Structures are given as C-alpha cells and as structure tokens.
Image: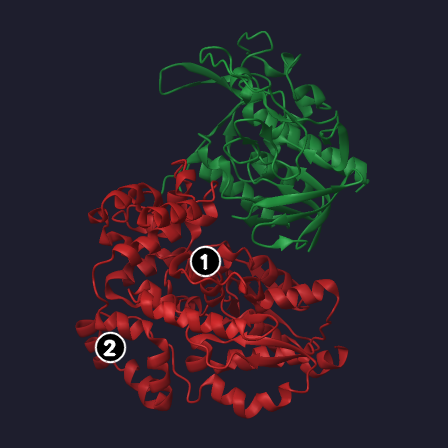
Chain colours: A red, B green
C-alpha cells in the first residue's frame, strides 16, 4: 500500500519528468542568497529518490525552502517541486513543533484571544524588552514588526453592520475572509463587501471557517491543518456559488495544498474557489458589470506579484483590473520574492536570509517611489511596509478607494 | 482578455516575434510553460556553420542555398541585420556579424563557427543578481518585451487549441482555463521535444496544442545508433508563409516559428539561433502585412 501511495504521489508530482536542467535552481530566491541551501532540484526530485529508499536521507535543511513555488513556475517539465519538498517535511520531519512555531501558526487561537485585548497586545509586542524576550526565549527575531490586532473581528462587524443588507441582493458570492482579515485587518473585508455590493452582488460568509492552514502546514502541524481543511471544504460544499478570497495564499492553499499536501479531496469545489480580482475582472470582460470612478482620482502605485499569485498564474487579472482605473499611474514591478514567506521571516534563524532575499524587490520599490504598493498577499504587505517603508494595499482596497461606489451601484 | 497576437512559447523565437510585433504597436501576449530555454544558451548565436553539402561556411549570407527554413525568408541579410539591432535595443552587446563567421573554442578544444558572441556577461556581485549568459539574454529580452507593452504568462502551459473552419477559434491554458485569453492570430513557437513543443510516443510524434501536421518518420524497428538521426528535423509542417498545416491545409491565423519548424537540423547546419530569430521576424512581418496592421 505504501509503495502504491508513493508511486501515485510521485506520478502526481511528476518526479520522473525532472530532466536535471537546473532552471529551478537558477530561479530559487533562497539559493541566490544562501549557499547552504541545496536548491530545489537537489532538495526535491534528487533527494526524493533517496528518501523513498530510506527515510534517514531526510535532511532538516529542507526547512530553508520558502514554499514560494518559483521553482515550479520555472520548470519546463511541470515537476511539482515545492510539493515534493513540503510533503517530505510533513512525512519525514522528526521534530515536534516548538512553542514559537505553535504561537506563530495558530492564528485562530492567537487571534481570538488577542482581539479581545487588542490595545494591550499591540502595545506590548511593540515594546523593546518584550521583543527582546520573544527573541531570546522563543526565537522570534526582535527586528520583525508584528501586524496589529483589530479591536473587533471582521466576522463580528459583518454580522452586525453588513449582513442585514446582503439579503436584498439577488446575486450572491461567498467570502472566505481568512485569519488576517478577521483578526488584524477587517478593513480589507469591508472594502470587499463594499465593492461587491456596488457591483450588484451580496456577500455571504461560510459560517465558521477556520484559518486556511498554510502556517500550520509549514510549522509541523499538518494534522491540525488537515482538520481545518476538512472543515473548510465541508462548509464550501454546503452552499452554492463561488467562494471568493482576497488573499493569494489562502486561495492557493485551499485549491492546491489541500489535495496535494494534506490529501483532502476538494475536486468537487476547487473551481468554485478563486481570487476576487479574477471574478471581478471576468465580470468586466464579459460586460456584465460596469464601474464608475471618482472624479479626478489620481494615484501612483506599483504592482507586486506575490509568489503564490504568480504560481496561480492569475497576476494577469490583477494587472488587467488595475489598468482599467483611470488616473492610476501603474508600474508593474519585476517579479521577485519579498522574502518573508509567512511565518518564515519571523524566525530568528531565517530573518537575515529573508531580508537578503527581499532586498532586490525593496530596491525596485525605492526606485519606483510609488504612493502605495499593490499586492494580494498579506504577509508581503507586512514585509514591504516594514522593509521598504511604503504603504501596501490589496487591489480590492485600491478599487474601493478609486470607485464612486454609489454611482457604480446605479450602473449595476 | 483579448489580444492581437498570442505567442505560445517563451524561448528565443517567441521573444523575438513578440518584441518585433510589440514594437509596431501590436498587442501581444506570450504564454510559456516554464522559464525560457534561453537559460541554456552559452552566449553564442549561430547563423550558419555548415552548408547543404556539409562544408564549413565562412560567409553565411552567401551559403544559404538549400538550407531549410531560410528558403522561406524574404531577405535573410536584412532580417539578420534587424535581429542584431533587436538584441542591441534590448541592451545586449554582441560581437560578430552575419557577413562573416567568427570562431569560438569549445571546451573540447575544437573551433566552431558562430554568428554572434555575447560580450561583458555580468558576474554576480549582489545577491539578487543572476549571472550566466543565457539567463542574462533571457532577462534582457523579457524586460524589452514588457517595456513595449507585451504581457508574459510564465509557468503556464497552452493547450486545447480549437481549430474550426480553418481558423484557430480559441485556446486554453493550464492556469487560466479555457476562453480566458484569445487573439485574432496565434504564433506557435513552442520549441521541440525538450520544451514539450513536440511529443514523441512509441508510435508517433505529435504537436500537443493544435494537433498540427507533423513531419516525422515512420516507426523504426531497426535502430542503428551510428546512422544519421532524422528526429532533429522533425517538426510542424507549414506553407511558404509559415502558416501551420492541419490535415494538409494551412490554418489561416496560426503561424509557426523557430525550433518547432520541420526540416531543419540545427546541429548539422549550425544554425539554431539564426532559424529561431529570422523565422520569428519573418512571421511578425507576415502577420503585419496580412492583417494590414
């Protein structure tokens, strides 16, 4: 049975298609800054042959992989290299997660506690001595800024302020908000509801969604991630219609990581789950909806392709959407990894590497000097705001800012 | 999303065609399954090393008689000059010219004729720099294409090309699904076996996106490994305007350029990059003329 599973997985990941061309290694952001990392080809298809023979060949150095997926994007043979590496970590990893990894990855638990005391928590984690303790005791680098917690969760706001009005819409979409919008930045969720309503769509929540689990997978808590995945897929299956997200990583995790890494079957609903920008861009393309913009709206922005957005192949929709905004001065940045890779960049042992990886992007941003950087990924947002000193907006938030919502509602 | 032209394949041909079209205001998208095969280029481009009789060539433009693909070009000398300019405009400094071959020494100590040699390959100094001539060339060409307004869809594979009444009516891509992108004209620049432009099974060789007519050879049961191997010349059949043939007839809005073209053996003739760039430029010209763009 084990052999059959291995063969099936290998076939799915196209291990045998690897030509050893090494393009993946040329595009790996980790290899570019840290020669200790063996690179995607070695860590992936090369070593997998040995690991399949004997699990003792598993090496912890695989932790250095960002799971950014740029190797897979580069591979001409369609080998799913990040899946090979992440699955090896899940299958052969021997260490139990540390307290730090538990804290960083359990966003639902931390979020629900922290939002109840948000002002205190936000103030506390910003204090130098506290950062020092987190650094020394837990291994969370003291230089990393923590995203602030909101005083009220998005779900709480939605139930009270938005839900009643949604019933009035004939067309509906469902929203997977994710833990960042819920506990840290409900504003993005509010922008999403405002934009969808203006386009003539009511918004519904899934009713008890859990964090998509990407951080749990990366931090040795795959079982917990699997439970979250089963629950989320169950909720998605329970209702009709598309499920939209505003996070490229949540989308990628639900569509691809659930079946490929966690063995959770989402085939019945995978095509229903997608980024809001793709949905909106398609509506505009077909002429089903129209947009009305604020008079004299002007903004200079730079678009950043988050690694998972690039892996999904959907940055074209974001760029298409941004190009439709009159008065927007748009620079499309050359696609480079920001280096934070979710919880990765918070860890002391990774911090310097993260910053080195992202430096190319930060330099591009400084040169472009935009008023804001636009991207779908929330952890890119933290990294770019901290390291390049420029505010970062989700394309949906930028759209909400640029639209004359009332006029748009009249058009649709 | 609608484009004037969609190019399938992001190698030297695809990028050359894309740059040539975009520089003339044609709205172009390029779909590439993986990063470009230019990555493997060693910084040296070939125009013609050996003629049809197998003799070494010192002045390529005088020896094009009987060379496959080159016969279909409107003016090889002019196209070669434009190819050299295209590379210069992309910020690439090459030495050499189409008039007369220069010579490179290979790692085995053999002198090989070549057309252009890259000067000043940057060495990696800063962590995020990429070094290596092929990567440098590729990045310069992609940057140039994007600066002219071209869109690159990287890491996405084109497939399920629909042909109805002798025209391409649509394609799918792996990540965008069907109908997400479309164009009035398409260029197939998908390379050869390694790039999945051609797929070989035990029974036959086919072109996976459109099922184009492929020029190959019958199944062989005797394998003499020392005989000349014809597979290098396998490729897609086209008419004299580089339009792809399907079931014997040209598809009116589908062109082919580069390694995917049938009949050429880039190793035997030493003309890989020449065929890739010159056929791409010719296809761009043919499209613009035909569409009166």
Give the SS element for disc 2.
Answer: helix
Residue B11 horizontal side relative to residue A152, left or right: right
Question: In the drawing, what numbered circle is on residue A284?
Answer: none
Instruction: Please name the residue shown 32% across and 90% down the image.
Output: A120
Q: Determine which quarter of the picture holds residue A24.
A: top left
* In the depicted structure, whether residue B3 falls above or below residue A181: above
Q: Is residue A385 shown to the viewer in this render?
A: no
State how far apart marks 2 and 1 are (Cα): 29 Å
Q: Quadrant of residue A98 in the image?
A: bottom left
Q: Residue furthest left?
A: A137
Is the residue marked by circle 2 packed among few (<14), some (14-19), or many (20+) residues within 10 Å?
A: many
Which of the 4 image quadrants contains residue A131? bottom left
Q: Is residue B95 above or below residue A242?
A: above
Q: Residue at x 60, y 55 (%)?
A: B176
Tell me the chain of label 2.
A
Q: Mark 2 or mark 1: which comes first in sequence?
A: 2
Tag in front: 2 or 1? 1
Which residue is tagged 1? A307
Q: Position of residue B207 (x, y in %)?
A: 61, 33
Disc 1 secondary structure class: helix
Q: Residue at x 51, y 16 (%)?
A: B221
Q: Which mark is residue A131?
A: 2
Residue B53 spot, x, y in % from top left: 59, 7
Q: Position of residue A292 (x, y in %)?
A: 72, 75
| Residue B130 in picture, x, y percent from top left | 40, 44
Q: As displayed, is residue A320 above or below residue B248?
A: below
Is A98 in front, or is A234?
A: A234
Q: How packed is label 1: few (under 14 Cα within 10 Å), some, or many (20 or more)?
A: many
Q: Is residue A395 above or below residue A84?
A: below
Q: Quadrant of the C terminus of chain A?
A: bottom right
Q: Nearest the camera: B63 or A313?
A: A313
């Amino acid at each position: 049975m084990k052999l059959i599973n291995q063969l099936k997985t290998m076939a799915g990941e196209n291990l045998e298609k690897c030509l050893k061309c090494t393009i993946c290694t040329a595009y790996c952001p980790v290899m570019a800054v840290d020669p200790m990392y063996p690179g995607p080809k070695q860590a992936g298809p090369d070593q997998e042959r040995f690991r399949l023979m004997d699990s003792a060949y598993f090496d912890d150095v695989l932790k250095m992989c960002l799971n950014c997926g740029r190797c897979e994007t580069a591979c001409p043979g369609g080998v799913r290299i990040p899946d090979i590496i992440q699955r090896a970590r899940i299958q052969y990893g021997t260490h139990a997660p540390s307290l730090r990894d538990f804290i960083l990855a359990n966003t639902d638990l931390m979020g629900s506690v922290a939002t109840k005391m948000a002002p205190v928590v936000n103030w506390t984690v910003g204090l130098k001595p506290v950062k020092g303790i987190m650094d020394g005791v837990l291994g969370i680098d003291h230089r990393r800024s923590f995203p602030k917690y909101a005083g009220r969760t998005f779900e709480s706001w939605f139930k009270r302020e938005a839900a009643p009005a949604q019933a009035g819409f004939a067309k509906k979409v469902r929203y997977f908000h994710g833990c960042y919008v819920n506990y840290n930045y409900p504003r993005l969720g509010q922008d999403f509801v405002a934009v969808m309503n203006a386009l003539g769509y009511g918004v519904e929540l899934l009713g008890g969604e859990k964090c998509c689990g990407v951080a749990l997978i990366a931090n040795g808590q795959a079982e917990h991630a699997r439970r979250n995945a089963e629950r989320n897929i169950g909720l998605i299956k329970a209702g009709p219609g598309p499920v939209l997200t505003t996070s490229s990583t949540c989308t990628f995790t639900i569509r691809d990581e659930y079946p490929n890494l966690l063995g959770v079957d989402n085939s019945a609903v995978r095509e229903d789950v997608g980024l809001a920008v793709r949905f909106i861009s398609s509506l505009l393309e077909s002429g089903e909806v129209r947009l009305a913009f604020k008079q004299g709206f002007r903004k200079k922005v730079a678009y950043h392709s988050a690694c998972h957005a690039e892996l999904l192949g959907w940055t074209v929709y974001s760029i298409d959407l941004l190009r439709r905004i009159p008065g927007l001065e748009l620079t499309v940045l050359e696609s480079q990894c920001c280096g934070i890779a979710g919880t990765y960049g918070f860890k002391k042992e990774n911090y310097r590497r993260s910053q080195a990886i992202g430096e190319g992007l930060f330099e591009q941003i400084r040169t472009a000097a935009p008023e804001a950087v636009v991207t779908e990924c929330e952890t890119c947002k933290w990294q770019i705001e901290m390291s390049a000193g420029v505010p970062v907006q989700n394309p949906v938030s930028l759209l909400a800012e640029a639209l004359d919502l009332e006029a748009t509602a009249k058009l649709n | 999303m609608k484009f004037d032209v969609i190019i399938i394949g992001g190698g030297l041909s695809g990028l050359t065609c894309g740059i040539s079209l975009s520089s003339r205001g044609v709205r172009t998208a390029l779909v590439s399954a993986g990063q470009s095969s230019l990555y493997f280029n060693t910084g040296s481009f070939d125009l013609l090393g050996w003629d049809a009789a197998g003799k070494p060539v010192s002045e390529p433009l005088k020896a094009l008689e009987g060379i496959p693909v080159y016969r279909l070009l409107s003016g090889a000398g002019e196209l070669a000059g434009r190819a050299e300019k295209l590379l210069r405009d992309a910020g690439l400094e090459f030495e050499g010219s189409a008039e007369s071959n220069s010579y490179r020494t290979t790692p085995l100590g053999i002198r090989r004729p070549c057309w252009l040699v890259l000067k000043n390959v940057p060495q990696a100094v800063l962590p995020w720099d990429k070094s290596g001539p092929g990567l440098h060339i590729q990045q310069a060409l992609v940057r140039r294409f994007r600066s002219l307004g071209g869109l690159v869809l990287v890491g996405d594979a084109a497939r399920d090309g629909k042909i109805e009444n002798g025209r391409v009516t649509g394609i799918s891509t792996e990540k965008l699904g069907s109908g997400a992108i479309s164009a009035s004209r398409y260029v197939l620049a998908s390379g050869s076996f390694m790039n999945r432009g051609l797929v070989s099974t035990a029974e036959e060789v086919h072109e996976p996106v459109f099922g184009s007519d492929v020029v190959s050879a019958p199944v062989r049961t005797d394998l003499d490994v020392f005989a000349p191997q014809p597979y290098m010349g396998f490729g897609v059949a086209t008419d004299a305007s580089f339009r792809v043939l399907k079931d014997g007839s040209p598809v009116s809005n589908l062109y082919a350029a580069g390694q995917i073209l049938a009949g050429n053996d880039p190793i035997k003739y030493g003309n890989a990059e020449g065929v890739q760039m010159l056929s791409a430029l010719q296809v761009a010209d043919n499209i613009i003329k035909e569409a009166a763009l």
